[in-house]
Amino acid sequence: SADRYKDPSQPLNTRIDDLLGRMTLAEKIGQMSQIEREKATPDVINKYFIGSVLSGGGSVPEKNAPPEAWVGMVNGMQSGALSTRLGIPIIYGIDAVHGHGNVYKATIFPHNVGLGCTRDPELAKRIGAAVALEVRATGIPYIFAPCVAVCRDPRWGRCYESFSEHPELVQNMTSIISGFQGEIPAGGTLGVPFMAGQRNVAACSKHYVGDGGTTNGINENNTVATFHELLSIHMPPYYNAVIRGVSTVMISYSSWNGLKMHANRFLITDFLKKELRFRGFVISDWQGLDRITTPEHADYLLSIKLGILAGIDMVMIPFNYTEFIDGLTLLVNNGTIPMSRIDDAVRRILRVKFTMGLFENPYADPSLTGELGKQEHRDLAREAVRKSLVLLKNGKPGDKPLLPLPKKTYGGILVAGSHANDLGSQCGGWTITWQGLTGNNLTAGTTILDGIKRAVVPGTDVVYSENPDAGFIQQNKARFDYAIVVVGEPPYAETFGDNLNLTIPAPGPAIIQNVCGSIKCVVVLVSGRPLVLEPYINTMNALVAAWLPGTEGQGVADVLFGDYGFTGKLSRTWFRSVNQLPMNVGDARYDPLFPFGFGLETQPS
Ligand SMILES: OC[C@@H]1[C@@H](O)[C@H](O)[C@@H](O)c2nc(-c3ccccc3)cn21
């Protein structure tokens, strides 16, 4: 019979059953294997029937690769897959967690902690649609986003990837999934993998489950919680993600009550797949199987057994694919892992690939390359920056408000601080490289300083000094009407961001004291999370939390100078001292510097 699985007019389950019925064990296990692009030659993909390829953070075809180079790379790999006996296309995945972060000149949006402060699910959906277009510009149909972590402790290095500490706010922001994948139409089936068309991408809600609840925020550590606490704090976003038709779920490195999530059959199979009826595929994190044991990779056969029996369908191996394939083959042949488990995994992977139209459209649409970094997307990102800013202080007690700042000044404006003129730092981690970069050469964008210069009336004396010394301040303080001090955290990702003291890194505090001690100042804090403020806040006239705004730094000036009012509300509790942590909205003991939901407002001037 003609290959019914190739016939798009056939019912979905007919296509899945027809194809699955034709597959050898090697072809099935190949579909469950995701390898890193460095290993993914067309020959390897063909020989091992590889089902998926990824770019890890910073893994690019070449430095500053244009979209055409990405398209060429992905299409080359795809040809290797389509030349196999059954011609099952690969699905290429990448982390587009705040825009297409790996890609030179992509639009970089505010990280999720800032988007949570917008309280605007509709905006998040529009951002999702724009990111999908920029990812498709590079020929990629699948992203490891959104992170739906409910970060309960800002000492966690990934807290900025979380929309909020409050599960309901995170649930609301899962609207971004409907942007990435498209909205399930009225009358459509909720709760099954969905993708509207070839200008959308398959999404991945991560990291299942409880990644944001580890002890002291230690990355990949242990989340101690009753089942009720897990269900009420960390699980809710997955209800919404599944209903919205999220195509994949990524498992967390962390443990729940001492059991590694990657080995947790109850939560992955009994709860996510059976109770929540998730029908897409479950993917491991990078070497997530290896890290089931301590030390990691100590017993890889055991890791494979535990991970696959727990219900993981696709394994982000990413390098030692022969070891994975041989190990899983052995475990199936010796009866440790039943074929029914393999078939469940492959069925789910095929369901996503058929649903997203990968069989009909395995190659990139070259007409989309112009979507990368498009001005329309940058304008959207700028809108998101504006709405993400939170005004925490506006004038000392008894003073009149300092913000919005006048665009016309009699004297000059002093702009100080490392983060005023540092595109990389305002983007944060997962930008061009895994950890992110400092400086202004990493990609195309507008620094906060650039934005200030464009906002004031032409001819205004704007003086930038990264770290003005006391002498400069004393000699010049009468010269300036006011100062804008932009300080904050360096870029970081994952464990490199774990931090137990949460102080503003030097020389930030000194710059604040030096400048704000002599000149009326507004401090703009560029950080992935709340930081210690109490020692300096009385010196400041005004204070703005800018989070990690991304490439469109103009959005900061838009609000500082009153083109738009401040509307942002804290997505996280602003603690007084790290000794209070963890401390979240709703806790019995709750004594924050600024509470969850706080944010002063100003009117457009
Ligand atoms: O980039 C792919 C995935 C990403 O989607 C996950 O959110 C994240 O937990 C992650 N960590 C690594 C990773 C960690 C350590 C060394 C090398 C890579 C890789 N990844």
Image (cartoon, rainbow, N blue to C red):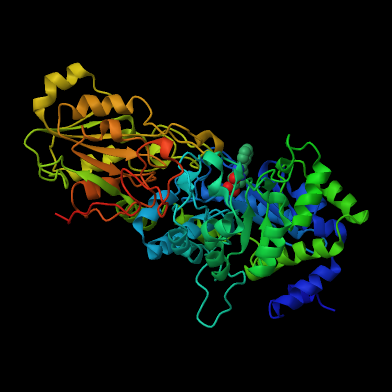
Residue in front for this viewpoint, 367 or 207: 207
Outermost residue, right side: 334
Report the side of 490 relative to 147 (left or right): left
Q: Picture coordinates of residue 166 (x, y %)?
A: 44, 56
Work out whether residue 322 can be spotted.
no
Q: Picture coordinates of residue 444 (x, y %)?
A: 40, 42
Q: Picture coordinates of residue 231 (x, y %)?
A: 57, 60
Report the side of 378 relative to 544 (left or right): right
Hey, which quadrant is residue 314 in on the image? bottom right
Hey, which quadrant is residue 13 in on the image? bottom right
Q: Picture coordinates of residue 18 (x, y %)?
A: 80, 74
Work out whether residue 220 can be spotted.
yes
Q: Residue shown at 67%/64% (left/top)?
A: 271
Residue in front for this viewpoint, 533 or 430: 533
User: The C terminus is located in which quarter?
Assistant: bottom left
Q: Residue shown at 61%/43% (left/top)?
A: 222
Outermost residue, top side: 471
Q: Residue shown at 86%/62% (left/top)?
A: 339
The quadrant of the rendered image in which ligand 1 is seen is top right
Residue in front for this viewpoint, 17 or 272: 272
Report the side of 413 relative to 199 (left or right): left
User: The N terminus is located in which quarter?
Assistant: bottom right
Q: How many marks?
A: 0
Instruction: Please tell me whether residue 301 is drawn above or below residue 497 in the rendered image.
Output: below
Report the side of 378 relative to 464 (left or right): right
Outermost residue, bottom side: 187
